[in-house]
Image: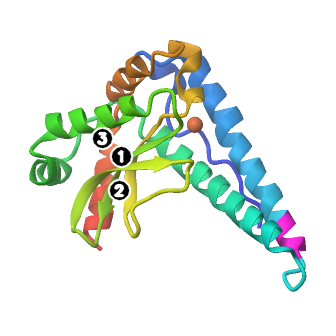
Amino acid sequence: MAYEMKPLACDPAGMNGLSEKIIVSHYENNYGGAVKRLNAITQKLAELDWATAPVFVVNGLKREELIASNSMILHELYFESLGASDASAALKSQIEKDFGGLDSWAAQFSAMGKAQGGGSGWVLLAWSPRNCRLVNTWAADHTCNLAGATPILALDMYEHSYHMDFGAAAAKYVEAYMNNLNLAVASAKFETLKGK
Ligand SMILES: [Fe+2]
C-alpha cells in the first residue's frame, strides 16, 4: 500500500510570526520525507523473507516503520494545529476540569515545548479514554505516546520546525506557535473522541 501526502492543512502565508517559507519547507521536506521513507520501508517489508531474515533486519525495519508512520501522522496533526481559532465550549470546559483553565493549560504546554528546545520531539495534547481526561504528553523520536490516548494538538520541537525563522531561540518559536493555535480543529477532534 502506498502512502500519499495529505494537502497542507494550514494557510502558510496566514501565520502570525511563522514564515511561509518555513511552513512550506517543513511540509515538503520533513513531512514529505517521512511519507517517502514510509513507502520505501513498506516496500522493503513486503519483500522480506520473514522465515530467514536476521533479527536485526526485522527489528530495524519495524522500528523505522514506526518512526516514519508517527512522523507522518504527527506532522499532519501539526499542520492542522496551526491557524488561530477559539476552543468550543465543550473543549474549554474539559480543559477547565483537567488543567484549571485555558491559561494554565497553555502555560504547561508551552513550558513543555521550551523544555525540549535544542532537542527533538513533540508536545501533544491528547484525550485518554483510560483516564477520561485530557493530558499533555511528551513524545521523543516520533515513537512515544500515552497508550490508548489520541493526540488532538501537536507541537513539533524538532529544530527544522524553527531554526530557519528563529535560529536556536526555541522559546520564541514556542511563543509564536501558541499565537497560532487552531483550537477549533482540536475542539472538533475532542468532541468526536469524547462522544465515543
Ligand atoms: Fe517536523
Q: Does residue 119 sit above or below 147 in this rendering? A: above
Q: Give the vertical position of 111 relative to 73 (above or below).
A: above
Crowding at label 1, few (<14), some or many (≥20) Cα neighbours within 10 Å? many
Ligand 1 quadrant in view: top right
> Looking at the picture, how far across and down is residue 128, in whole percent?
30, 65
Q: In the rendered image, which quarter contains the C terminus?
A: bottom left
Q: Is residue 15 above or below residue 153?
A: above
Q: Which residue is mark 2?
A: 189
- Tell me if label 2 and label 1 are in contact, CB under 8 Å: yes
Image coords of residue 184 (percent x, y): 30, 43
Amino acid on which disc 2 is placed: Lys
Q: Secondary structure at mark 1?
A: helix
- Looking at the image, which residue is at 50% across and 38% down? 79
Magenta part of the chain: 44-48
Name the element at disc 2.
helix
Farthest-out residue, bottom: 51
Label 1 within 8 A of ligand 1 by Cβ: no
Residue positioned 56% across, 19% down in the render: 163
| Label placed on residue 183 | 3
Q: Residue at x 35, y 37 (%)?
A: 182
Q: Residue 22's mark?
A: none
Q: Disc 1 vs disc 3: Cβ atoms closer than 8 Å?
A: yes
Of helix, strand and loop, which one carries label 3? helix
Q: Residues within 10 Å of mark 2 (few under 14, many from 20)?
A: some
Which numbered circle lies on residue 185? 1
Q: Report the front residue among 135 and 185.
A: 135
